[in-house]
């Protein structure tokens, strides 16, 4: 399978989905965008890495990982988004130490936050981009492009979260079943579904 290189286009905050962000990755040699729903902490970490002038007073978790890796001569060479299952992207860190390569599983948001700190390229497979990539319409007037992109990203994020919303009627489930489903959702990194299950448990 052929790899496609991606760049970070930006991060969009949803005005309609509280606490949700969309990380938009851009195909380097094409026009497709790959939207990935991420949490607030990861969005903050990525935004700080993008803004070179922002220096947090103490190291964030991803900064700590970078400092730790530097101390022990570990380099993240590249990040590969290698799988998409039920709306969840799976990624790998390709690391090197003493000319020996290791592949480490990572959440996509964490992998990208680290890729920025190591200045490592980000890739995905063509079939994933074919499946999840979209075209964002851009207003031809340059001064309106940013606003247009922001609105489109917000709509896209709402659509993405709507797709991932659980279809089950949780009201018919017992508390024991809900706790089991919650554990499964967390294990599958389906945090949106987990949030809905948690809300139903709280109502009880």
Image: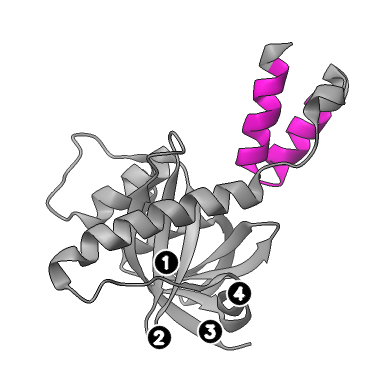
The part of the image, by quadrant, that contains residue 14 is: top left
Residue 40 magenta-drawn? no
- Rendered image: mark on residue 3: 3
The Cα atoms of the two marked residues, 2 and 3, are separated by 13 Å
Question: Which residue is labeled 1 in the image?
Answer: 76
| Residue at 28% in and 50% down | 47
Q: Which mark is residue 157?
A: none
Q: Nearer the viewer, mark 2 or mark 3?
A: 2
Which type of secondary structure does the marked residue at label 2 adopt? loop
Q: Could you tell me if the residues under marks 4 and 2 are in contact, i.e. CB atoms within 8 Å?
A: no
Relative to 104, 202 lies left or right: right
Residue 128 got which mark?
A: 4
Residue behind mark 2: 30
**40 or 146: which is nearer to us?**
146
In the rendered view, would you say 150 is above or below 79? above
| Mark 4 residue crowding within 10 angstroms, few (<14) / some (14–19) / many (20+) | some
> Which of pointers 1 and 4 lies earlier in the amino acid sequence?
1
Mark earlier in primary sequence (3, 4):
3
- Distance CA(mark 2)–CA(mark 1): 25 Å
In which quadrant of the rendered image does the N terminus lie?
bottom right
Q: Which range of residues does the magenta coloring cover? A: 179-201
Return the x and y of residue 13 as percentages of the image width and height: 36, 45
Say few, some or many: other residues with alpha carbon within 10 Å of mark 3 (under 14 / 14 to 19 / 20 or more): some
Q: Does 161 sit above or below residue 79?
A: above
Judged by depth in the image, the label closer to the viewer, 3 or 4, is: 4
| Badge 1: residue crowd in 10 Å (few <14, some 14–19, many ≥20) | many
Mark 2 or mark 3: name the one nearer the start of the chain: 3
Q: Residue at x 58, y 69 (%)?
A: 132
Pointer 1 with pointer 4, Cβ within 8 A: no
Distance (Cα) linking label 3 and label 1:
17 Å
Label 4 and label 2: CA atoms lie apart by: 14 Å
């Amino acid at each position: 399978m052929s790899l496609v290189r991606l760049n970070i286009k930006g991060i969009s905050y949803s005005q309609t989905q509280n606490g949700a962000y969309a990380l938009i990755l851009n195909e380097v040699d094409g026009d497709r965008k790959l939207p990935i729903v991420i949490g607030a902490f990861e969005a903050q970490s990525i935004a700080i890495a993008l803004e070179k002038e922002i220096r947090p007073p103490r190291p964030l978790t991803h900064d700590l990982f970078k400092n730790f890796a530097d101390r022990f001569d570990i380099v993240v060479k590249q990040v590969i988004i290698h799988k998409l299952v039920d709306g969840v992207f799976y990624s790998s860190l390709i690391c090197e130490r003493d000319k020996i390569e290791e592949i480490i599983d990572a959440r996509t948001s964490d992998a990208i936050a680290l890729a920025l700190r190591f200045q490592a390229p980000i890739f995905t497979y063509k079939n994933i981009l074919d499946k999840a990539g979209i075209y964002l319409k851009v207003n031809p007037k340059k001064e309106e492009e940013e606003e247009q992109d922001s609105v489109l990203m917000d709509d896209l994020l709402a659509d993405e979260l709507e797709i991932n919303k659980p279809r089950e009627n949780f009201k018919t489930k017992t508390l024991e079943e809900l706790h089991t489903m919650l554990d499964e959702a967390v294990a599958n990194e389906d945090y949106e579904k987990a949030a809905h299950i948690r809300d139903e448990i709280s109502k009880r």
